[in-house]
Amino acid sequence: MVAAGLQYTFWFGKNSVKTLKETEALIAAEDAHIEGLRKRNQKLVAEILDLKNAEESMEERARVELGYVKEGEVFYRVVETDKAVEYSRPVINNSE
């Protein structure tokens, strides 16, 4: 009778095998989440070090993300379209 009570507690009680498996699954999910955060933090640290040490990277980031142009430079915007555009030379009228 005592063995049956212990078996019941082992399989279905407060600290049962089911609870153990659920807890292990939660721990594994949290470990995966923490690993993702570690990788993100490593990328951020690398980016911070790059920004502290390289003026070129700050300039590149300002150009790409904010559209900055240096003084004396000319900004050209190239717009691609789906349709092919046919260009021709202007016709010079010599009859004048």
Image (tube, helix red, strand yellow):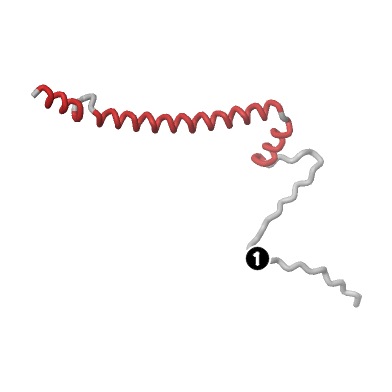
Q: Quadrant of residue 89?
A: bottom right
* Residue located beneath label 1 in the image: 83
Q: Residue furthest top?
A: 2
Residue 28 in percent (x, y) is at 39, 31
* Residue under the point 79% across and 69% down: 88
Say what amino acid the circle numbered 1 marks: Lys
Q: Where 82 sits versus 9, above or below?
A: below
Give whichever of 38, 89 is nearer the camera. Answer: 38
Residue 32 in percent (x, y) is at 44, 33
Q: Residue furthest left?
A: 1
Q: Quadrant of the C terminus?
A: bottom right
Give whichever of 87, 1 is nearer the camera. Answer: 1
Residue 90 in percent (x, y) is at 82, 69
Q: For the residue carrying disc 1, how many other residues have a C-alpha within 10 Å: few (<14), some (14-19), or many (20+)?
A: few
Numbered disc total: 1
Residue 93 left/right relative to 1: right
* Residue under the point 81% across and 41% down: 72
Q: Quadrant of residue 41?
A: top right
Q: Secondary structure at mark 1?
A: loop
* Residue under the point 67% across and 58% down: 80
* Residue under the point 51% across and 29% down: 38
Give whichever of 78, 16 is nearer the camera. Answer: 16
Give whichever of 54, 87 is nearer the camera. Answer: 54
Residue 37 left/right relative to 46: left
Residue 87 in percent (x, y) is at 76, 67
Q: Quadrant of the N terminus?
A: top left
Q: Quadrant of residue 64?
A: top right
Q: Residue furthest bottom?
A: 95
